[in-house]
Amino acid sequence: MTDERLMAGFRGHTHHGFRGTSPVIELDGVPVLVSMDIDGVLWTCDLRAGTCAQRPLELDAAAPDDDWYREIGLLDDDADEDEDWRPEFEIDVWGIVSVFTTGHLEGRPVVVTGGGRFDLARFEEDMMGGAVRVWDLRTGRKIGKTLTGHELGVCSLTAVPYERGLLVVSSSEEGTLLAWDVATGERLAEIEGSYNGAMGAALIDGRPIAATGGHDSFVQAWDVLRGEPLGEPLTGIEPVVRAIAITRTGGRTVVVGGGDDNALRVWDLESQKPAGPPLTGHTDTIETLGTATVAGRTIAVTGSRDGTTRIWDLTRGEQIGEPLDGRHLHTCIDIAGTPVAVTANSGNGILVWDLTRAAPAPPEQLR
């Protein structure tokens, strides 16, 4: 029997993916899923037609810029600047692209990547840490500077449009959260979050807000541009926290988090208190999390190691419908006016779900 909630499905693409989620972005008016293979080739998949195209990244350009070399002393002050002084660059795709996301920079679609813990080690024996880089989705060319500052690998990465353009927030294994203005390469904030954890960010009432969690029994919300905590830690969750989102529901801002204790928790950011009891149903770790608005209500969608994707009504505090097929939630997005969830299932396929069918309005709204 065909699941009426399923809009489209196709195989042969998820084996190209790296760890973490594969984002969806509009490219020339078409929603495409973006992933990357072990050779550093970008894959864009048309979610309507189910066709895929390749766009290799110019990974030779991943080396940091000249100023960065000068700062760590790799360029001798007496060296001839016209000489080819750059050290040989050994490409390690996994090191350069450990996690990635997408966004729009000055009208063009871009891919933002975060490197693993040994990303920068090839340049100087004592250097470690992952860098953040921006690439043109259409050409695969690197845009702007290589953004450095993390001591270990980048484990979470989010791009948020804000008043000056595109803000990228990166969280690393050592717990440092950095915020960058992509257009200028300016570092706007440095925040000490949770060790080796998760991070979610969003634009709420015109200001970028982030929330961090990990090997702590709490989640902390932050005003990103000020680099200041928003209230006290949000408690009640057990480590390890692996997925976090920030959204609006019922006129209030809420932080949503899940992880190794299999439950989804929701906190009211203003009151600093849980917005209800934990939402249970998963039987294994919640790994991925997204939010969407369907029929005027805010929902959360969670992917779990138990092999299912579940939908939750954040206002009513309950699960909606039966689980969807798919351990891994790639994203929630609006396609041609229809909110959808994109999941990966155990059969190595991509599934696109109509959330208006998967999360129908409650009976009282239908009267």
Image (tube, grey):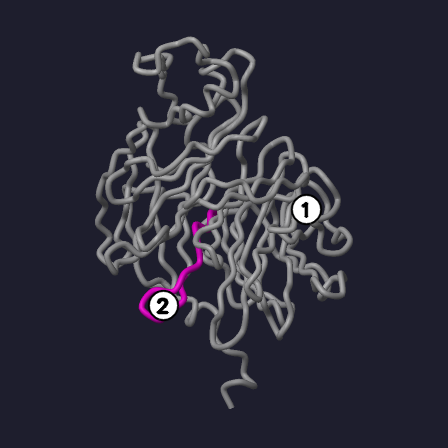
288 or 143: nearer the viewer:
143
Mark 1: secondary structure: loop
- The quadrant where residue 96 appears: top left
Left or right? Give the position of 330 relative to 266.
left
Q: Please, is residue 44 above or below residue 280 in the view?
A: above
* Residue 198, horizontal then vertical, whole percent: 60, 43
Disc 2 is placed on an element classified as loop
Label 2 neighbourhood size at 10 Å, few (<14), some (14-19), many (20+)?
A: few
| Residue situated furthest bottom in the rendering | 367
Q: Is residue 71 something one can see in this rendering?
A: yes
Q: Which residue is mark 1?
A: 261
Position of residue 331 relative to residue 251, above or below, is above
Q: Residue at x 50, y 52 (%)?
A: 308
Q: Name the residue tied to disc 2.
A: 4
Magenta highlight on residue 339:
yes
Q: Earlier in the sequence, mark 2 or mark 1?
A: 2
> Magenta region, mostly helix, strand or loop?
strand
- Distance from label 2 to label 1 (Cα)? 31 Å
The amino acid type found where label 2 is placed reads: Glu
Q: Position of residue 21 (x, y in %)?
A: 45, 45
Give the quarter of the figure containing the N terminus. bottom left
Give the quarter of the image for residue 137: top left
- Asked if marks 2 and 1 touch (Cβ < 8 Å), the reply is no
Residue at figure coordinates x 36%, y 16% from the top left? 90
Taking the image as shown, residue 211 lies to the left or right of residue 80, namely right
Q: Is residue 184 left or right of residue 211?
A: left
Mark 2, mark 1: which one is toward the viewer?
1
Question: Which region is colored magenta?
Answer: 327-340
For label 1, the crowd category at 10 Å Cα-Cα, with few meaning under 14, some 14 to 19 and many 20 or more, is: some
Residue 72 place in picture, x, y as percent: 52, 18
Q: Amino acid at mark 1?
A: Asp
Please state the horizontal and vertical placement of residue 109, each as a whole percent of the image.
32, 50
